[in-house]
Image: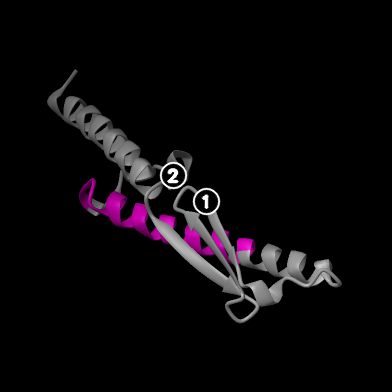
Amino acid sequence: MDNNMAELFGKVNEMQQQIKEAKENLGRLEVTAEAGGGMVKVTANGNKQITGIKLEKDIIDPEDPDMLEDLIIAGVNKALAEAERTASEKMQEITKNMLPGGGIPGMDMSKFGL
């Protein structure tokens, strides 16, 4: 194996380790989204998992559960979208610094979840 191939495989192994660490760090990243003027707050992590839901007491109306359900759905969707956007930005920051030129030319980084 020539030196260039050995160096490339070393870079790939290093990149895989950095991606693994980055994904672990995403689990600690938190974003919060609001619905209903802040009456519903939903928190998600960078792994796109809901970690918390806060409801203002005034939003709970036993006569209108549909409104509360709609607000929770809206809050969850906003939080997941924000988590996706933030996680994608963080992963792009990491991968652009891994190899010269931001990656391996011709390689589709989306296969690595990026």
How far apart marks 1 and 2 lie (CA) works out to: 22 Å
Label pair 1/2, CB-CB below 8 angstroms: no
Q: Earlier in the sequence, mark 1 or mark 2?
A: 1
Location of residue 16 with respect to 69 vertically, above or below: above
Location of residue 28 with respect to 39 vertically, above or below: above
| Residue 61, picture quadrant | bottom right
Q: Nearer the viewer, residue 94 or 54?
A: 54
Give neighbour class at mark 1: few <14, some 14-19, many 20+ (Cα, 10 Å): many
Residue 70 screen position, x and y as percent: 75, 68
- Please tell me which residue is depicted at 30% across the width and 39% down the height of the picture: 21
Q: Residue under circle 1?
A: 48
Residue 12 screen position, x and y as percent: 27, 33
Left or right of 81: which side holds 12? left
Residue 93 screen position, x and y as percent: 30, 57
Which span is picked out in magenta?
76-100
Q: How is the image coloured?
A: one colour
Q: Residue under circle 2?
A: 108
Magenta stretch contains residue 81: yes
Q: Marks 1 and 2: which is nearer the front?
A: 1
Q: Of the residues shown, which amino acid type is indicated by label 2?
A: Asp
